[in-house]
Amino acid sequence: EAQVTQNPRYLITVTGKKLTVTCSQNMNHEYMSWYRQDPGLGLRQIYYSMNVEVTDKGDVPEGYKVSRKEKRNFPLILESPSPNQTSLYFCASSSGTGHMNTEAFFGQGTRLTVV
Amino acid sequence: DQQVKQNSPSLSVQEGRISILNCDYTNSMFDYFLWYKKYPAEGPTFLISISSIKDKNEDGRFTVFLNKSAKHLSLHIVPSQPGDSAVYFCAAKRYDMRFGAGTRLTVKP
């Protein structure tokens, strides 16, 4: 079954404690991205990757890091989480960019609370 | 700077009637537009899309209209069903995807 898998689904952590949210897709997609969803703001892009070892900032990259060492995995790293990073996070992947347009497949989401 | 805007945070319609969800965008470089549907505790799922070279795309009860000169697209659901109750996100894409804030649709039996 084609899917995007995020872990964990729920996480409560304390300010400053480094954490990683994993994302894996089994569709051999080149393009992967991370979004955060906040009330009234919709889905805002944090980082995206067009292929292995190619990553770029989205609209709200501050406080986040990513890596793309393998095609299937795109972890989101919070080196020093702060309460304003409390949000619902989604990973997405798609097979095309630019004129090779296809829809994105989303993971189930990770609800992060930073206290 | 929000490049994709959904100005109606919520919409309520009666079962069987038409639902019209609206979306505006500012970047004329977008060349592909999509609608996603999201239920609570789930990730968004793709619903329907339209290329910038078209002005209409239909899939069953769902139709998306694109007005490039007005930088406006809309999603029509006819007839609306209670199972359509969800949050709908409009998205626009060239090399990466930008989303609107979403519209919560409630279809009342």
Image (cartoon, rainbow, N blue to C red):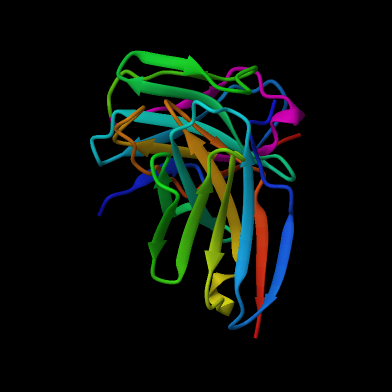
Location of residue A59 (image quadrant): top right
| Quadrant assignment for the C terminus of chain B | bottom right
| Residue A46 in sight in this render | yes
Please indicate whether residue A20 sits to the left or right of residue A95 in the image: right
Given the current orientation, which residue lies at the most extreme front position?
Answer: B69
**Magenta segment range?**
A72-89
| Residue B100 spot, x, y in % from top left | 63, 42
Instruction: Report the residue at 58% width, 56% height from top.
Output: B88
Location of residue A46 (image quadrant): top right
Q: Tell which of B51 and A87 is nearer to you.
A: B51
Image: A112 above or below A82: below
| Residue B69 spot, x, y in % from top left | 57, 38
| Quadrant assignment for the N terminus of chain B | top right
| Residue A90 spot, x, y in % from top left | 52, 40
Location of residue B85 (image quadrant): bottom right
In this rendering, the count of numbered labels is 0
Q: Tell which of A17 and B75 is nearer to you.
A: B75
Q: Tell which of A17 and A86 is nearer to you.
A: A86
Instruction: Report the residue at 33% width, 41% height from top.
Output: A102
| Residue A16 spot, x, y in % from top left | 69, 20
| Residue A112 in sight in this render | no
Q: Tell which of B93 and A95 is nearer to you.
A: B93
Image: A81 above or below B23: above
Image: B109 above or below B3: below
Decide whether residue A26 is among the magenta residues. no
Please indicate whether residue B2 sits to the left or right of residue A34 in the image: right
Instruction: Report the residue at 40% width, 46% height from top.
Output: B54
Decide whether residue A76 is among the magenta residues. yes
Instruction: Report the residue at 69% width, 30% height from top.
Output: A85
